[in-house]
Amino acid sequence: MKESKALKWNIWQQWVVANAWSEFIGLGGSALVGFILVAIAPSATPVINLLIAVAMVIIATVLEGGIVGLAQWQVLRQVLHHLTWKQWVSATTRGAFVAWSLGILPSTLLSLQETNDGAPPELSGSAMAGLAVLMGLVLGSLLGFFQWQSLRQHLPNATRWIPLNAIAWAAGMPVIFAGASSLSAEASLLMIGGMAIMVCLLTGAIVGGIHGFGLIWLLRRGISCTSQS
């Protein structure tokens, strides 16, 4: 029993670390590419904005979906021995594609409105926080759904992975919004880089910590169901 608890605690720790560093690379790398694309864009026309949005979705799908999926699988394979990296990375990448496609839609529409009609009205702090939580719930559910399609083949009660992801990202998304809104237009590259590192690591740790606890709970129930059968 003690060895089992120690193993689960070790898995949770590895899971949090894996999510933190992989989001740092995946999410941070995607943000960096987006920053570079905006900086080198010749002009903020509707066509340019749409092209940047499409490029961001593709790059983020490969970077965040692939790296996070691989990092998570490195932990999962210790307890779900028949789960292959192709299954998990493919599920995570597909989820990342859908999540990024929907997640980047509001900012793209706002940028088009800004191009055509001037700057759109700014949201209040509470409205921004509410939008972040709502986006986290929706996008987290989508990512969880795609991962559930792979997880259900190896773990009983895997359906609960969907709301667990929704809760985790509802907590993590406000960190991203807060970090982005805290920077002014005059912020130095050093300040932007430091904030990006902190936000990506913190977001990954928060999200991983929350659905990591859920993962341990699912593993415990899965092992219990397997032993009873």
Image (spheres, rainbow, N blue to C red):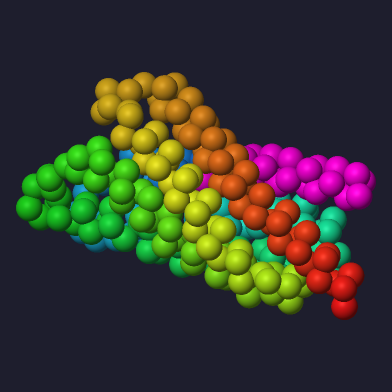
Q: Quadrant of residue 45?
A: bottom left
Q: Is 169 rendered above or below residue 87? A: above
Q: Position of residue 149 (x, y in %)?
A: 63, 75
Q: Residue at x 76, y 60 (%)?
A: 219
Compared across the picture, whether 77 is left or right of 63 comes to right
Residue that extends furthest to the left in the rendered view of this protein: 117
Q: Nearer the viewer, residue 74 or 123?
A: 123
Query: Which residue is located at x 36 percent, y 48 percent?
Result: 132
Q: Position of residue 214 (x, y in %)?
A: 65, 55
**Taking 82 as reference, is 182 above or below it?**
above
Please indicate whether residue 70 sits to the left or right of residue 32 in the image: right
Judge left or right: residue 79 versus residue 205.
Answer: right
Give the vertical position of 31 relative to 219 (above or below). Answer: above
Image quadrant of residue 175? top left
Is residue 110 highlighted in magenta?
Answer: no
Q: Is residue 7 part of the magenta span, yes or no? A: yes
Q: Is residue 223 left or right of residue 92?
A: right
Question: Which residues fall within the magenta stretch?
Answer: 1-27
> Percent from the top left, x then y, of residue 81?
86, 65
Q: Residue at x 47, y 46 (%)?
A: 171
Q: How many marks?
A: 0
Pick the quarter of the image with the C terminus.
bottom right
Q: Position of residue 124 (x, y in %)?
A: 20, 40
Work out whether residue 154 can be spotted.
yes
